[in-house]
Amino acid sequence: MNLKVPEKDVIAAIATPPGRGAIGVVRISGPGSIEIAGRVFSGARNPSDLPGYGAALGWIIKDGARVDEVICLVMRGPKSFTGEDVAEFHCHGGPAVLRLVLEAVISAGARPAEPGEFTRRAFLAGRIDLSQAEGVADIIASETEAAARAAASQLEGALSERIGSVKDDLVRCLALAEAAVDFSDQEDVPEGLEELDRTLESARAKLQKLIEDAGRGKRYREGARVVIAGKPNVGKSTLMNALLGSDRVIVTSSPGATRDVIEDSVEIGGIPIRLFDTAGLREGGEEAEMIGMKKTIKSMSEADLVIIMLDGSRPLEKADLAVMTQAPPSYIVAVNKTDLPSQMSVEEVAKICGPPAALHISALTGEGLDGLEQAIADKLLGGKGAASPPFVTNVRHENAIREALDNLARALAARQDGLSEEFLAADLSRALDSLGLITGETADEDILDIIFERFCIGK
Ligand code: GDP
């Protein structure tokens, strides 16, 4: 790693969010942190006498006065988050008292920590790699449960493991390529070249899979636009309200009530979704309705997914087919009003919508809506479902994987064109460097600054 060894000073910060809470934590890390804690703490036991993960009850003393009654928790390096000696004061969670405790600790010899400095130390100490450190920030920033699960899997090392396996392949290829260079003046093709080709292809396939997975990650991160379209009166507004769990849109039994596109946000299967209810599509109608229909067609063309609604209590009509012709490549057909006697033949619908089969729902009673939500999530995640969290959720990681793939493509081309193994070795080294950016071996100070800047102070 081409990074500066951190200065071994003691850093301190309030680690809990601003505002009031049951407890607030002041964290201190670095060699001598436990002694510094001892200078401001008065209790039955001195922090320096505590074993790792030992705790003591006592008072924080500042300028001779008692500030707060706290628990002092001691973690001894390397068995701590930063890998260094760490002391934490679990205080009462008020902003003023926490500031006083932090000031006391700073007067006793610590310095205020920079954003993310604790995690940066954990990374520089080799406790976690860079993608795991980013997992820490992502867990904190997660707004949906799916995002939190993906971040936890990254922190656990799921991405690092996959990148590590590709790196192993590439290191093996480099060794084989170098051996081939050494034997290049011999007549026989070195045996290792076959293994090299196989390993190279396996590495490429693994990276390709990760890139496909990045598409899922992007969905969780950036969300999707989902448009509900169909003839007037099929139940679009009722479905919009049902999915939102509120009466956002006015529902009437007179066709053409929704003249404008109405949008709102909802989370489906962990994906943040912008949901659009549109004006019904039919022939004719007055001017305002025509303008509404134009907007519907525009929304459909900009959608990631369209839900085409049919009214199952009526026979299929030409106007239903007209809606289908406007559908983008990604759509779901939902036959609504299953609570009423069916007038629409399943075969007829299947003929026009093709596989997968249409879903039967009742927007009014809620029947079939769970299945519809599942289908929406599956469709947006490329049929992969939300069974496992995505491995690649971060644009930085995705870019590095693409860079590595480009270098591998060049390496494969070099093999096919019979270029010398030196060219191959150069491409392989570059691919390894790109992957090292993810785990941090080839990351420089500037990259670390950018990454840790987005952390909060105290993490
Ligand atoms: P839109 O014009 O497509 O937005 O349709 P609306 O949501 O305004 O609904 C039109 C009419 O159909 C209203 O009277 C709704 O109550 C009714 N409706 C919608 N969904 C259902 C359903 O699943 N079952 C039944 N029986 N009626 C429904």
Image: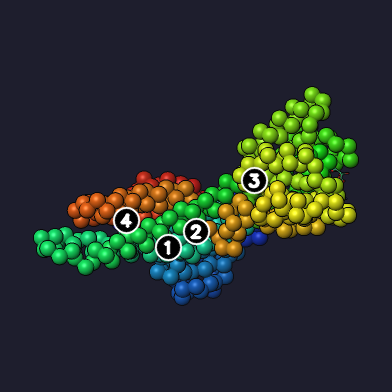
Which amino acid type corresponds to the residue marked 2 in the rendered image? Phe
Q: State the residue in front, 246 or 316.
A: 316
Task: List x then y, in percent, for residue 269.
Answer: 65, 56
What is the secondary structure assignment of the residue under circle 2? loop
What is the secondary structure assignment of the residue under circle 3? strand
Q: Which mark is residue 162?
A: 1
Give the alpha-carbon distance from disc 2 to disc 1, as whole Å.
9 Å
Q: State the residue in front, 112 or 187.
A: 187
Q: Residues within 10 Å of mark 4 (few under 14, many from 20)?
A: many
For ligand 1, the image quadrant comes to top right
Q: Is mark 1 within 8 Å of ligand 1?
A: no
User: Reading the chain from its start, which is encountered first: label 2 or label 1?
Assistant: 1
Which amino acid type corresponds to the residue marked 4 in the rendered image? Leu
Task: List x then y, in percent, for residue 340.
Answer: 88, 53
Give the alpha-carbon distance from disc 3 to disc 2, as whole Å.
23 Å
Are discs 2 and 1 less than 8 Å apart at CB? yes
Q: Which mark is residue 432?
A: 4
Disc 3: which residue: 305
User: Reading the chain from its start, which is encountered first: label 4 or label 1?
Assistant: 1
Quadrant where the N terminus is found in the figure: bottom left
Are discs 3 and 2 less than 8 Å apart at CB? no
User: Reading the chain from its start, which is encountered first: label 4 or label 2?
Assistant: 2
Picture residue at 88% right of the left edge, 40% below the top: 252
Disc 2: which residue: 391
Q: State the residue in front, 1 or 17.
A: 1
Query: Looking at the picture, does residue 253 appear above or below residue 245?
Result: above
